[in-house]
Image (cartoon, coloured by chain):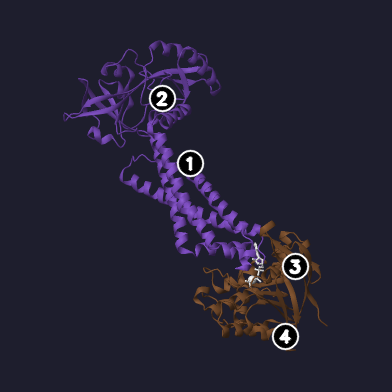
Amino acid sequence: MLRTAIHASGLVKWFGEGEAKTTALKEVSLEAFFGEMLYIVGPSGSGKTTLLSVLSGILRPNAGNVSVEGADIWTLDANQLADFRLNKLGFVFQDYHLFPRLTTAENVAIPLILRRIQWDKALNDATKYLDIVGLHGKAELPPLKLSGGEQQRVAIARAIVGQPDILIMDEPTASLDGETGRAIVGFVRENILNDHRCIVIVTHDSRIYEYADRTLEMEDGRLTAAKKVQDEN
Amino acid sequence: MKGILKLAYKLVVNDKSKFTALLAGITFAVFLMMFVTSMFGGVMNHSAATVINIGAPIWVMDPSVENPLNTVGIPDYVLDAVRSMQGVKYAVPLYSGSALLKLSDGAYQPAMIIGLDDTSLYGRPELIQGKIQDIYAEGGFVAVKDADFPKLGNPHIGTEFELNDHRAVVVGIAKVSTSSLFGLPTLYTTYYRCLQYIPNPRYTISYVLIVPQSASDIPRIKEQAKALGYLALTKDEFIGRTVDFYIFHSGFGMNLLIITAVSFIVGLSVSGQTFYTFILENLERFGALKAIGTTNRELVSIILFQAAFTSLTGYGLGVGLCVTLIGIAKLRMPEYAAMVTAFSVIVPFLMVVVITAISSYFGVRRVLAIEPFEIFRG
Ligand SMILES: Nc1ncnc2c1ncn2[C@@H]1O[C@H](COP(=O)(O)OP(=O)(O)OP(=O)(O)O)[C@@H](O)[C@H]1O
Ligand SMILES: [Mg+2]
């Protein structure tokens, strides 16, 4: 039986007022399950990032609600939301946003340190996760000494080090060449996805479509189709 | 929180070039500020040297006297009037003025002459050579062994010189706690001898020194002096009046203000600017931290900690540098007029606090304004 990780209904989000008003989400509803890798695809400007932000408690919708593991997140206040993101979610951004003056291990340890885990233990765990993403021995290097693909792996390690239930990835392969992109998403699918985790990926990159369990298509603020691309289970 | 602050620390310290610029700005500003206030402290101390060395609790003077270097004569009847005031235990005259000495080698040397009350020798300095009673001997003077002592030709007991065609002889060598400013050697003699040796205007008493019966008599003494048309100040008030004079009626106050402004501007523009650039450079990463669940409070703590840490380190370096340089200068010139006072430590500290507050205010504003959604959109 599939357990629901995210349930969203009637999401509306607009920006600006009057003439300049753009409605980025027009009554979007969706469901994401544990154990699946859900893709959201669609043309540029169709509202994918907006949707991801609303789902993950970063951007407040004008209407509709989102519940994560049964809890309605948009009734929470700012601090509770921050707490929710820290404890339940892992983020991989299109740009990696790593601190260049910290070592890769320190970068990866940040979510643990924010959870008040003791420095040495946090660094230990971070180093383990660097091993998991295939960066053994690179813990002490500054991120800028790594290649783009390796930096994205660091970002993934940072996203999963706190063992989040839900992993949110926005265009994770946009700054990578095709092979590297495929390798990384394939790696995530093989090693990070499990029955207790849900992974939501927004992408343009057709070269990684093959890893999806399910793909939602967005166009002009609406979900147009939900299709199962491929069944690997 | 400890871990978060450690992160904050690493973020700022590991950025070597910015951290260096931050420290340099604060250090320089603190150094400049502290140096000029120490200078001021030293000058104040020296210019109030007569007041400090004589040490009388109450000083009666003409109301137009602004500092101990410029005295205005008081008529003799004032001394008598003061002696009969209520609350006065005793009162003595003091002469303070300058005179031109002719040294034994024929050279002329201006000097500061202090004439002590003949009967009590109230305010006499501590002698390191000779006996104080010899001050009563024919032409007896006590020379003060301070930085300007060599200008008298390093006299010893028995050294003779001339003062307005009067023969004078050194009968003792004294030490004082504070040497006077502006490079004049100091000689003590009796009040009466000053009147004889130094051509004087009509009124000859520079100050009437009072020892009150008790501290509670001071207000009453002041009132009575005022009724007489004179000003009675406690020792501290007189020193304060001297400081006021230098701040408000000499170029010193303006210079102090200018240096304060300069060091503030240097500190703020170098360090404040660098700190702000540091924040801007990391803005997106702070935004990413926000997205992954850092609260605003934590972000503010990070920035305040970074600002406070660099400022305090810079402050420490600035103070250290200033103390070292003044120390070295004093080794080479024992009476170098700079003195590290509480004032000269506190003023730069306050300045650093203001600089820190301003630069972190702008940094905090920027970081709080980031929308994590914008970071997400890239
Ligand atoms: N802060 C904003 N102010 C005004 N309009 C905005 C804002 N953010 C997004 N939009 C608009 O909302 C729409 C959806 O934007 P969004 O970033 O979600 O698209 P996207 O599908 O992620 O595009 P891409 O594939 O280029 O990342 C666009 O038309 C965009 O211009
Ligand atoms: Mg997008």
Crowding at dot 1, Cα within 10 Å, few <14 / some 14-19 / many 20+, comes out as few
Front of the two marks 3 and 2: 3
Of all residues, the one furthest to the right in this rendering is: A1
Crowding near pointer 2: few (<14 within 10 Å), some, many (20+)? many
Residue B371 appears in which quarter of the rendering?
bottom right
The residue positioned farthest toward the bottom in the image shown: A232
Q: Which residue is mark 1?
A: B342
Where is residue A9, by image quadrant? Answer: bottom right
Q: Respond yes or no on whether mark 3 lies under 8 Å from ligand 1.
A: no
- The reply to whether callout 1 and callout 4 are in contact (CB within 8 Å) is no
Which of discs 4 and 3 lies nearer the camera? The answer is 3
Residue depth check, mark 4 versus mark 2: number of the one nearer the observer? 4
Q: Is residue A98 left or right of residue A62?
A: left
Apparent side of residue B42 relative to residue B145 in the rendered image (left or right) = right
**Which residue does the numbered mark 3 point to in the structure image?**
A26
Please report contact status of discs 3 and 2: CB closer than 8 Å, yes or no: no
Looking at the rendered image, the disc whose residue lies closer to the viewer, 3 or 1, is: 3
Point out residue B15 in the picture as x, y percentages from the top left corner: 49, 64
| Badge 3 and badge 1 in a common chain | no
Q: What's the chain of the residue with tag 3?
A: A
Q: Which mark is residue A229?
A: 4
Q: Which residue is mark 2?
A: B66
Chain coloured purple here: B
Residue in front for this viewpoint, B59 or B227: B227
Amino acid under disc 1: Ala
